[in-house]
Image: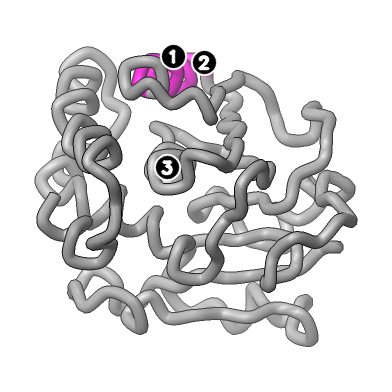
Amino acid sequence: MDLILKYFPNITERQREQFAALLPLYEDWNSKINVISRKDMEHFYVHHVLHSLAIAKVVQFRPMAEVLDVGTGGGFPGVPLAILFPESRFTLIDSIGKKIKVVSDVIGQLGLANAKAMQIRAEQLGGEFDFIVSRAVTALPEFVPWVKGKISPSQYHQLRNGILYLKGGDLDAELRPFAKKVHTWNITEFFSEEFFETKKVIHLPLS
């Protein structure tokens, strides 16, 4: 929790409570279903919560912004972002039912009225969104066709509507097809922890 306050000192008391509640909620669920690897649970706030919040260093979601988290898994990056932006609306989807069961319970227990979880594939979901967020679900050239046509043409943010992707490693080959449009940020620009040395936020406008 100290890490969250270090990088986001202006959060409200309610947000502090919600961020603090995340660890016991996921520890409880992890004892029943292996949602997060045991090794990762030792570094829960760095590897999952803070990593998700790197997106918030790139864009501030505006009130009523529609954000879709594709392949949310245990609820990342969608749940931490929904806590940080209570006036924006988040839809978290995954094709695996047991993961959505966990995410739905976490959303309910945190009282996140601005978030919902659905068991569905991205290709089957209707609607338009300002941003689509995801965390290393697949290579970006495979991911883009899943979500093409789901980006709203109406622009309300300084950053153009599109994909915000969290991924690490050497991404040169993966991003080459989008070289003229894509922008990347090294997460070490925002957070100093060693875990983020090779991690990036990728923005691909699709509107």
Considering the image in quadrants, where does the C terminus appear? bottom right
Residue 119 location (% of width, % of height): 61, 19
> In what element is the residue under mark 1?
helix
Give the residue displayed 44% in from the left and 14% down from the top: 101
Q: Residue at image x 38%, y 21%?
A: 111
Quadrant location of residue 177?
A: bottom right
Q: Which residue is mark 2?
A: 97
The residues colored magenta run 97-106
Q: Please name the amino acid that badge 3 sits on.
A: Phe
Q: Mark 2 belongs to which amino acid?
A: Gly
Decide whether residue 147 is among the magenta residues.
no
Residue 43 as seen in the image, left or right of residue 140:
left
Q: Nearer the viewer, residue 4 or 73?
A: 4
Q: CB under 8 Å between callouts 1 and 2?
A: yes
Q: Which residue is mark 1?
A: 101
Gap in Å between the C-alphas at discs 2 and 3? 16 Å
CA neighbours of label 2 inside 10 A, class few (<14), some (14 to 19), many (20+): some
Characterize the local packing of mark 3: few (<14), some (14-19) or many (20 or more) Cα atoms within 10 angstroms.
Answer: many
* Nearest-to-viewer mark from 1 and 2: 1
Mark 3 or 1, nearer chain start = 3
Give coordinates of residue 206: x percent, y percent. 82, 63
In what element is the residue under mark 2? helix
Query: Residue at the location (28% across, 18% down)?
Result: 33
Mark 1 residue type: Lys
* Residue 181 vertical placement versus 49 (above, below): below
Residue 88 as seen in the image, left or right of residue 113: right
Q: Are marks 2 and 3 in contact (CB under 8 Å)?
A: no
